[in-house]
Image (tube, helix red, strand yellow):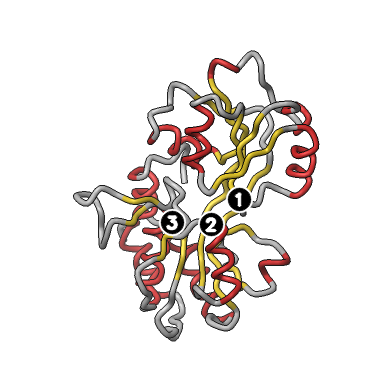
Amino acid sequence: MPRLLLLLCLLRALPASEALPILRLGCDPTPPYIEMLPAETAVGGRLGGLWVDTVQTVLAELGQPHEPLRLTPWNRLLRMAEEGGVDGLFGITRSPERERYLRFADEPLLADPWLVWIRNEDADRIAYTTPEDLAGHGVGLVTGYNYGEDFVARLRAVAVVEEVADEQTNFRKLAARRIDAVVSTLQVGTRTAAAAGLGATVRPLHGVPVKLSVFHIAFRHDRAPAEWVAAFSDRLAAFKRTPAYAALWRRYALAGDP
């Protein structure tokens, strides 16, 4: 049996799960995972990206209806998830506080290292192995992102930390010399810099990552029972093994292999 046909059969053979009421899901604009696409390339609307296409594929496999995805700044989206303004969100990292009101799919969407990004011209001036290496420098973070409590506390003690609402603003500030460094993941930073025409202007410091984040999709406890979330997780794991997922990885030009 051809490999693609076998994988499709395996997907269909996974246990069915009864559909929930129409879900309201939110996400934060984070290319290449979540991004607005040109109208001529969009499938089912203007919102696309590796995670958008993956989540919508898995929901379709489960026969689960959902409202159009809500594109919302991250800090506001977290509040909406906690207060019931959305039923779930994706691109979120696990923490005890978040698990208090969210049920996480065990299968992650992806793992991505957080790196310090600088201007190419500063390669001989700025290095990173610990937060103390950034003493005296202006460093851009995004409000609500989980960089690790220890890293942020140590960084604030020695550097000038500036927080903004999104990655794009941070990279523009870096290019304009308003800050000296940005903390972003490998995949997101690469795409954000390229989209802003900064691919030849900025670079990540690859030596020591700030942390490795494992990103998930999560649903409110009162909207998605454990068995449904487990079924979603199983379908997600199966889909990530298919050629269709590998094609999405290439389509959105992620670094490395799936």
Residue hosting label 1? 143
Residue 86 location (% of width, % of height): 49, 73
Cα separation, mark 3 vs mark 2, equals 15 Å
Residue hosting label 2? 74
User: The disc labelled 3 sits on which kind of residue?
Assistant: Trp
Looking at the rendered structure, the secondary structure element under dot 2 is: helix
Depth check: give the residue in front, 22 or 171: 171
Q: Can you tell which quarter of the image residue 152 is in?
A: top right
Point 34% across, 48% down: residue: 247
Looking at the rendered structure, the secondary structure element under dot 3 is: helix
- Seen in the picture, residue 151 relative to 61 is either above or below; the reply is above
Cα separation, mark 1 vs mark 2, equals 8 Å
Look at the numbered discs 1 and 2 and tell me whether their residues touch, using CB distance below 8 Å: yes
Q: Is residue 8 left or right of residue 219?
A: left
Point 40% across, 71% down: residue: 59
- Seen in the picture, residue 46 relative to 156 is either above or below; the reply is below
User: The disc labelled 2 sits on which kind of residue?
Assistant: Trp
Point 62% across, 49% down: residue: 213
Residue hosting label 3? 51
Depth check: give the residue in front, 82 or 190: 82
- Seen in the picture, residue 21 relative to 156 is either above or below; the reply is below
Cα separation, mark 1 vs mark 3, equals 21 Å
The local crowd at label 2, few if under 14, some if 14 to 19, many if 20 or more residues have their Cα within 10 Å, is many
